[in-house]
C-alpha cells in the first residue's frame, strides 16, 4: 500500500486523490505554504509526511505504518508528519498509531491553547503561539496589527507530529532549512522541536520590531503641534493588539526554561543548549513588549494631559471674551433702564462719554488678558 493509501486508512479521510501526491512532493522538495485560505494543497489536513535517516530525507513511497515500523525496528531515524487544522476524525487513526494521549489530542484538534509543555509518558506535547504582523497603510482605531495562530508539536523518540492552526506560520521553509543542514537532523526529533521554537521566537522579534514602528508613529503624532487632536482610539487599539502579542509570548517563557534546564528523555543535553539560546531570544522579546506597554501608557497619559491643557486654554479664551463682552453689556443694561432721574441722562456729552468708558475698560481688560496668555 502506498503512503497516500495508508494515510487514508490511518486518518479515516476516505477517497482523497490529492493524497497521492505526498511522495511526489517529497521527492521534488516542493515548498508547502498554507498561507492561503485552503487547508492543504493535498486536499486534506495532511501537509507532508517524511522519513529521515542519518539526517537525510528518505526518498520513495513507503507508507506511514511501514515507515514507523521500520524506524522503530532499526532504531534509526524518525518520521515527521505535518498536519493543518485536522478534525477529530482525521486525527483519531494517527493518535492510535503513535499512541498519543487523548488529552493532548483534544488540545491539538480544538486549538485555542496557551503556550505550554506537557509530558505524556515518552511523548512531549508542546504548544506554541505563532504571530504575524498585519500590514496597514495607516493605523486607525480598528486596525488589526497582530494576527495569531498555533503550532502543536508531538515529540517522541522516533516521530514528530506538527499540527498547525491559522493561515500563517507555514513550516515548509523551516523543513527545507533543516534538510539543508543534515547534521542538525541527525540529532533526532528534538532538533525539529528546537527549530520550530526558534522559528516561532524569531517571528516574535520580527513582529515586535514592526509594532515599534507603529508606536513611534503614534508618539510622533501625539507630540506634534496638534497632538491633542489625535484619535485616542489609535492608542487603545495598539494597546489591545500589544496585549494579544503579550498573551502569545509571555506564557512561553516557562516551557522553554524547562526544555533548556530540565532533563528529558527525548531531548538530548546537547539540544538543551540550543533551547537556552531560544530562551534568551524570548526574554528579549518579552522585555520589548513590556517596555512597549509602559511607553504606550506614557503616551496615552501625555495625550490626555494635552487634551486637558487644550480644553483649559479654550476655557480661558472663552472666559476672557466673556469678560470683555460683559463690560458694554453691563453699561448698556444700566442706561437702558427707564428711569427719569439718572446721572448724565440729559447731558450732551453723556453718550460719547459712555462709549469712552466702555472702550477704555475693554482695552484695559484685553491687554491684561493678552499679557497673561489668556488671549
Image (spheres, helix red, strand yellow):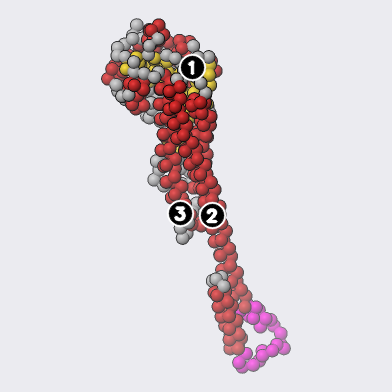
The residue singled out by tag 3 in the image is 221
Q: Which residue is mark 1?
A: 265
- Decide: marks 1, 2 in contact (CB < 8 A)? no
Q: Residue at x 45, y 10 (%)?
A: 97
According to the picture, the residue beneath numbered tag 2 turns out to be: 302
Residue 1 image point, x, y percent: 34, 6
Is the residue 265 above or below the residue 310 in the image? Answer: above
Residue at far left of view: 28
Q: 10 Å neighbourhood of mark 2: few (<14), some, or many (≥20)?
A: some
Residue that sits furthest to the bottom in the current view: 348
Residue 32 showing in the rendered view? no
Give the residue drawn at x 44%, y 43%. Answer: 211
Mark 1 or mark 2: whose residue is earlier in sequence: 1
Residue 80: % across, % down:
39, 17
Q: Is residue 9 left or right of residue 24?
A: right
Residue 195 in the image: state x and y as whole percent. Answer: 40, 26
Q: Are marks 3 and 1 in contact (CB under 8 Å)?
A: no
Q: CA distance from mark 1 to mark 2?
A: 53 Å
Amino acid at each position: 500500500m502506498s503512503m497516500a493509501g495508508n494515510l487514508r486508512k490511518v486518518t479515516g479521510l476516505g477517497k482523497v486523490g490529492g493524497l497521492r501526491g505526498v511522495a511526489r512532493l517529497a521527492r521534488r522538495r516542493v515548498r508547502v505554504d498554507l498561507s492561503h485560505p485552503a487547508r492543504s494543497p493535498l486536499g486534506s489536513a495532511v501537509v507532508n509526511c517524511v522519513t529521515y535517516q542519518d539526517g537525510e530525507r528518505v526518498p520513495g513511497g513507503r507508507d506511514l505504518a511501514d515507515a514507523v515500523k521500520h524506524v522503530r525496528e532499526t532504531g534509526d531515524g524518525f518520521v515527521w508528519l505535518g498536519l493543518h487544522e485536522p478534525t477529530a476524525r482525521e486525527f483519531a487513526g494517527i493518535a492510535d498509531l503513535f499512541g498519543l494521549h487523548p488529552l493532548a489530542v483534544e488540545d491539538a484538534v480544538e486549538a485555542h491553547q496557551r503556550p505550554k509543555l506537557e509530558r505524556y509518558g515518552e511523548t512531549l506535547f508542546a504548544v506554541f503561539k505563532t504571530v504575524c504582523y498585519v500590514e496597514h497603510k495607516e493605523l486607525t482605531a480598528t486596525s488589526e496589527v497582530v494576527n495569531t495562530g498555533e503550532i502543536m508539536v508531538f515529540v517522541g523518540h522516533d516521530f514528530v507530529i506538527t499540527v498547525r492552526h491559522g493561515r500563517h506560520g507555514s513550516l515548509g521553509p523551516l523543513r527545507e532549512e533543516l534538510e539543508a543542514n543534515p547534521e542538525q537532523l541527525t540529532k533526532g526529533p528534538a532538533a525539529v522541536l528546537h527549530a520550530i521554537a526558534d522559528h516561532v521566537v524569531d517571528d516574535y522579534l520580527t513582529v515586535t520590531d514592526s509594532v515599534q514602528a507603529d508606536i513611534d508613529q503614534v508618539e510622533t503624532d501625539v507630540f506634534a503641534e496638534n497632538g491633542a487632536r489625535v484619535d485616542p482610539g489609535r492608542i487603545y487599539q495598539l494597546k489591545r493588539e500589544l496585549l494579544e502579542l503579550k498573551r502569545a509570548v509571555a506564557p512561553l517563557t516557562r516551557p522553554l526554561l524547562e526544555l533548556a534546564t530540565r532533563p528529558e528523555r527525548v531531548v538530548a543535553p546537547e539540544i538543551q543548549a540550543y533551547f537556552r539560546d531560544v530562551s534568551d531570544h524570548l526574554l528579549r522579546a518579552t522585555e520589548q513588549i513590556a517596555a512597549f506597554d509602559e511607553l504606550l501608557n506614557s503616551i496615552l497619559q501625555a495625550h490626555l494631559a494635552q487634551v486637558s491643557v487644550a480644553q483649559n486654554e479654550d476655557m480661558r479664551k472663552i472666559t476672557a471674551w466673556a469678560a470683555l463682552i460683559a463690560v458694554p453689556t453691563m453699561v448698556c443694561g444700566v442706561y437702558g433702564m427707564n428711569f427719569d432721574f439718572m446721572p448724565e441722562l440729559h447731558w450732551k456729552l453723556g453718550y460719547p462719554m459712555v462709549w469712552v468708558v466702555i472702550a477704555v475698560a475693554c482695552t484695559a481688560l484685553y491687554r491684561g488678558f493678552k499679557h497673561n496668555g489668556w488671549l
